[in-house]
Image: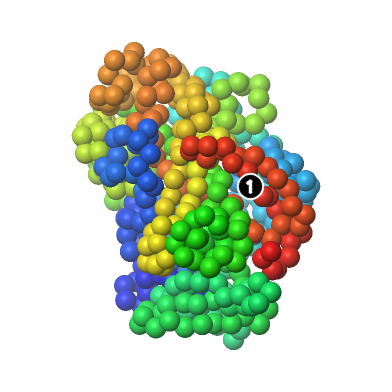
């Protein structure tokens, strides 16, 4: 295993392990610090010219960077995978045994109920819940407006609002490195090269991958050869970059950079990334002083929601992550200015709303986005970041549906719970939306374009696998034009043709 990341021997990474410190990880030394190109129609109120795309530059990848929520999704999501691949093993029933095998749920309450059958008891990734009474009135409020309340939203067949599971155990983040690599670190056949970046895949005359070229921490370029196979697992953005630097990708792109073309394939096309929209509700006044947080626990009470605009629908349209900030503007400041980050003046309004008040800070994401982007390169240097066009909201359906989900979510302000404390939806000053009626559909469209962020919790995917057998042609759209790409079946060869 070869990994480009900060050497933990130089500075012990408690900020990785401890849940309360997750706001410090974005834009840090363990983040690749990628950003999107400026697409002009979204993120007008961000503090940078583009959108931050957090990606873990550390053992465990982005599982060492994300925000701990453990969400499997619902069975409908997996059914669509099975239909697209024409392979039933990708549906919920086919994957459930692997979910169970992968986890240990440390929750006696769920394990003693009918929901226990959906969870594992001896898997490598340990899961817990942090039940908190502060969430109960919010769950009541959403139930009042017609949303389901569920004990466990990870069983595939139900959706609603619930207190979440976390990838935290014994106050330690359960990243893929902690779960899978730590237990085998003393094995004689397991080796990790730290602070070493792969810059090219090596091929033989028949285009079989036989090894890699890498640069070590000392700047030395080395070649490493495989006995059996080379597994590329560099993430959504770095995998297409590496393939293109190795000669696998769109011919026009490679030839423009004088890269020898091994295979002309649409690598990096069909980027499907989740965006989200920030919305806040100001609750009652309070002079409560937050107790010092347990560094090993999630920093504030939180709950998650799977929602559908049509209550008769059998699957959700959008997901919300909801944080309860009781007179702790410092947490809100970290979320708004570091994790996201929004412009200073927008953050100041949200921080003011959280001062001597309780604030419900929510992030809404559409479960199945329509918009499609791409990842490319404009340099032959491995040091150059990939060119990332996420193309958020370029499909009009995404804009319309995000507006509908915002309208649906803020109906909670009409509940007796919210009305009883004089709660209001925080309307930040957005000059581009100034001529629109607050609460109208057009306003929420403008709001979504202005207050959107990248939703790293769910992640993203690009077309990178390049050994299809048989070939299958599907349609997709980019920011500017319609194109075609080659999908792959479950049966594939190891060579690139």
In the image, residue 18 above or below residue 219: above
SS for dot 1: strand
Classify residue 42 by image quadrant. Answer: top left
Q: In this view, does 443 lie to the left or right of 165?
A: left
Percent x, y of residue 49: 29, 44
Which residue, as the protein is rendered here, is positioned at the far bottom?
A: 188
Residue in the image at 32% along x and 59% along y: 28
Confirm whether residue 284 shows in the render.
no
Q: Residues within 10 Å of mark 1 (few under 14, many from 20)?
A: some
Q: Which residue is drawn at 61% across and 62% down?
A: 263
421 and 103: which is toward the camera: 103
Q: Can residue 83 be seen in this view?
A: yes
Protein image colouring: rainbow
Q: In which quarter of the image is the N terminus?
A: bottom right
- Counting from the top left corner in percent of width and height, residue 481 is at 53, 37
> Total label count?
1
Q: Where is residue 203 in the image (x, y as percent from the top left)?
A: 61, 75
* Placement of 190 over or under 433, stated as above or below: below
Q: Residue at x 21, y 34 (%)?
A: 345
In front: 219, or 341? 219
- What residue sits right under mark 1 in the picture? 485
Residue 412 placement, left or right of 125: left
Residue at 34%, 13% in the rendered image: 437
Instruction: Name the one closer to the observer, 72 or 46.
Output: 46
Query: Between 139 and 190, which is closer to the camera in this rendering?
Result: 190
* 379 displayed left or right of 474: left
């Amino acid at each position: 295993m070869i990994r480009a990341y900060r050497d933990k021997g130089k500075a012990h990474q408690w900020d990785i392990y401890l849940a309360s410190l997750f706001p410090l990880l974005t834009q840090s030394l363990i983040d690749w610090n990628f950003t999107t190109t400026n697409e002009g129609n979204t993120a007008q109120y961000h503090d940078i010219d583009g959108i931050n795309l957090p990606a873990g530059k550390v053992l465990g990848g982005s599982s060492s960077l994300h925000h701990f929520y453990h969400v499997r999704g619902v069975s409908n999501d997996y059914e669509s995978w099975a239909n697209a691949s024409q392979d039933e093993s990708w549906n919920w029933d086919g994957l459930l045994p692997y979910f169970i095998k992968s986890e240990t749920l440390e929750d006696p309450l769920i394990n003693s109920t009918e929901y226990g059958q959906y969870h594992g008891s001896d898997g490598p990734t340990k899961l817990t819940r942090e039940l908190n009474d502060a969430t109960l009135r919010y769950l009541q409020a959403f139930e009042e407006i017609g949303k389901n309340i569920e004990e466990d939203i990870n069983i595939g067949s139900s959706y609603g609002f619930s207190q979440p599971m976390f990838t935290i155990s014994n106050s330690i983040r359960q990243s893929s490195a902690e779960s899978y690599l730590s237990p085998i670190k003393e094995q004689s056949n397991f080796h990790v090269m730290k602070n070493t970046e792969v810059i090219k895949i090596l091929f033989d005359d028949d285009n079989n991958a036989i090894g890699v070229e890498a640069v070590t921490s000392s700047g030395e370029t080395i070649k490493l050869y495989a006995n059996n196979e080379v597994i590329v697992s560099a993430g959504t953005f770095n995998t297409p970059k590496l393939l293109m630097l190795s000669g696998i990708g769109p011919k026009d792109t490679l030839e423009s950079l004088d890269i020898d073309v091994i295979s002309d394939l649409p690598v990096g096309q069909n980027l499907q990334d989740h965006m989200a929209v920030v919305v806040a509700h100001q609750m009652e006044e309070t002079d409560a002083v937050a107790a010092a947080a347990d560094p090993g626990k999630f920093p504030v009470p939180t709950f998650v929601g799977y929602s559908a605009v049509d209550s008769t629908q059998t699957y959700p349209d959008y997901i919300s992550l909801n944080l309860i900030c009781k007179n702790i503007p410092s947490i809100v400041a970290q979320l708004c200015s570091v994790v996201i980050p929004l412009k200073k003046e927008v953050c100041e309004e949200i921080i003011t709303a959280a001062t001597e008040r309780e604030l419900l800070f929510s992030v809404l994401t559409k479960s199945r986005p329509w918009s499609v982007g791409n990842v490319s390169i404009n340099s032959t240097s491995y040091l150059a970041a990939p060119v990332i066009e996420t193309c958020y909201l370029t499909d009009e359906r995404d804009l319309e549906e995000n507006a509908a989900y915002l309208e649906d979510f803020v109906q909670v302000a009409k509940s007796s719970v919210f009305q009883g404390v004089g709660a209001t939806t925080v309307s930040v000053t957005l000059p581009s939306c100034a001529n629109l009626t607050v609460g109208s559909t057009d306003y929420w469209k403008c709001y979504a374009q202005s207050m959107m962020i990248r939703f790293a919790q769910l992640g993203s995917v690009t077309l990178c696998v390049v050994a299809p057998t048989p070939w299958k042609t599907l349609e997709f759209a980019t920011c500017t034009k319609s194109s075609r790409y080659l999908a792959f079946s479950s049966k594939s060869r190891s060579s690139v043709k």
